[in-house]
Image (cartoon, rainbow, N blue to C red):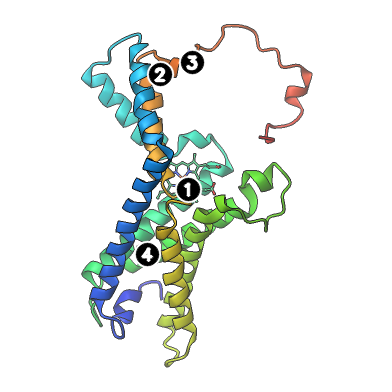
C-alpha cells in the first residue's frame, strides 16, 4: 500500500499533463501570494531598512569567513532544527510537520513529473517518502493544533475554536490527511466505488486552499523566518544587536514567584 505510487494509478483516468499543470499552478500561486503579501505588509522593505540601520551601529566589520560561518550556523541551527522554538514539544512537533511536508512535497513532484504514467515502474522509495511524509505532517500538525496552539495551551480557549491564523496549519493537515486516505482507498481497488474519488476531490480542494491562501495564511513564514534568523545572527556577530542594549550584568531579581510555574501565559 505504502509502496504504491497513487499518481500512476490516477494516470489511468486523468492525464499526467493535467497533474503537472496543477503542480505548476500551485507553485505560481505561492509566488503570487508571497509577492502580494510582501507589497501589502511592506515587511521586506522594513527588513532591509532595519538591516541598513543596524549595519551603521555595527561594532566590527565581518570578514567573508565570519559571514559564511554565520550563514552556516543559521542553516544548521535556526532553519534545519528550528532552534527559535527552544527545547521541547513545540520544536519536536514543528520538526515532524516541517520535514514531513518537505518529504510529501518532494515525493509529489518527483512522482508527478517522472512516474505519473499508467503502470509506471516507480522505485518504491518515492511512494514510501510520500506516505511517510504525509503521516509525519498529520502527526506533527495535529499535535500542534490540538495541544500546543498558544490560544489553546495558554489562554484556555477550547481546542475547536478556529480563527484565520489557523488557515495554514489546518490546510496543511487537511491536504496530507486527505492525500493519505485517497491513496489508501485507491490502492484497495474498490471497483469504481465513490470513496477514493471523494477523497481525491477533498485532496484537490485542500491544496487549492493551502497554496491559494498564502496571502491570508502563515504559509510565507517558511521564507521570512530564515531571513529574520540570518539578520539576527549577523546583528549578534557584528555587535549591532539590532540596536538593542546588551544583557545587563546584574543579579536577576524576579521575586520568589518566578520558580512556581513554568512560563506559558503569553
Ligand atoms: C516546509 C517548511 C515549514 C512548514 C511546513 C512549517 C509549518 C509550520 C506550522 C504548521 C506552524 C504552525 C502555524 C500556526 O501558528 O498556526 C509553524 C509555526 C512556526 N514555524 Fe514553521 N514551517 C516550516 C518552516 C519553518 C522554518 C524554516 C522556520 C524557521 C526558520 C519556522 C519557524 C516557525 C516558528 C517559529 C513557528 C511558530 C511556532 C509556534 O507558534 O509555536 N518554520 N510552522
- Marks 4/2: CA–CA distance: 39 Å
**What kind of element bears circle 3?**
loop
Neighbour class for label 2 at 10 Å: few (<14), some, many (≥20)? some
The Cα–Cα distance between marks 1 and 2, rounded to whole angstroms, is 27 Å
Q: Secondary structure at mark 2?
A: helix
Q: Quadrant of the N terminus?
A: bottom left
Quadrant containing the C terminus is top right
Mark 4 beta carbon near ligand 1 (under 8 Å) = no
Among the two numbered marks 3 and 1 on one chain, the one whose residue lies closer to the N terminus: 1
Name which residue lies at 64% across and 51% down.
147
Provide the secondary structure element on which disc 4 rests. Answer: helix
Disc 4 versus disc 1: distance between alpha carbons?
Answer: 23 Å
Residue 77 showing in the rendered view: no
Residue at (23, 20) in percent of width and height = 65
Q: Nearer the viewer, mark 3 or mark 4?
A: 3
Mark toward the start of the polypeptide (4 vs 1): 4
Badge number at residue 218: 1
**Picture coordinates of residue 197 (x, y %)?**
44, 82
**Mark 1 within 8 Å of ligand 1, using the beta carbon:** yes
Where on the picture, by quarter, is residue 264? top right
Q: Earlier in the sequence, mark 3 or mark 2?
A: 2
Residue for point 30% across, 29% down: 71
Closer to the chain start, of discs 3 and 4, is 4
Return the residue at label 2: 236
**Residue at mark 3 to residue at mark 1: CA–CA distance:** 27 Å
Amino acid at each position: 500500500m505504502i509502496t504504491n505510487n497513487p499518481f500512476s494509478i490516477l494516470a489511468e483516468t486523468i492525464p499526467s499533463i493535467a497533474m503537472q499543470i496543477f503542480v505548476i499552478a500551485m507553485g505560481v500561486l505561492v509566488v503570487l501570494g508571497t509577492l502580494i503579501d510582501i507589497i501589502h505588509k511592506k515587511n521586506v522593505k522594513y527588513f532591509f531598512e532595519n538591516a541598513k540601520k543596524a549595519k551603521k551601529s555595527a561594532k566590527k566589520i565581518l570578514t567573508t569567513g565570519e559571514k559564511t560561518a554565520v550563514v552556516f550556523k543559521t542553516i544548521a541551527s535556526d532553519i534545519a532544527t528550528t532552534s527559535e522554538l527552544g527545547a521541547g514539544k513545540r520544536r519536536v512537533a514543528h520538526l515532524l510537520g516541517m520535514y514531513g511536508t518537505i518529504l510529501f512535497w518532494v515525493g509529489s513532484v518527483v512522482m508527478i513529473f517522472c512516474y505519473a504514467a499508467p503502470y509506471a515502474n516507480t522505485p518504491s522509495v518515492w511512494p514510501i517518502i510520500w506516505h511517510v511524509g504525509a503521516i509525519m505532517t498529520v502527526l506533527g500538525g495535529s499535535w500542534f493544533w490540538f495541544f500546543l496552539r498558544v490560544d489553546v495551551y495558554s489562554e484556555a480557549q477550547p481546542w475547536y475554536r478556529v480563527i484565520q491564523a489557523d488557515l495554514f496549519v489546518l490546510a496543511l493537515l487537511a491536504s496530507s490527511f486527505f492525500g493519505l486516505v485517497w491513496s489508501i482507498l485507491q490502492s484497495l481497488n474498490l471497483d469504481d466505488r465513490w470513496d477514493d474519488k471523494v477523497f481525491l476531490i477533498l485532496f484537490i480542494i485542500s491544496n487549492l486552499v493551502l497554496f491559494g491562501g498564502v496571502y491570508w495564511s502563515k504559509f510565507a513564514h517558511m521564507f521570512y523566518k530564515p531571513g529574520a534568523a540570518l539578520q539576527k545572527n549577523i546583528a549578534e556577530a557584528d555587535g549591532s544587536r539590532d540596536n538593542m542594549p546588551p544583557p545587563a550584568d546584574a543579579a536577576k531579581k524576579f521575586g520568589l514567584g518566578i520558580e512556581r510555574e513554568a512560563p506559558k501565559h503569553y
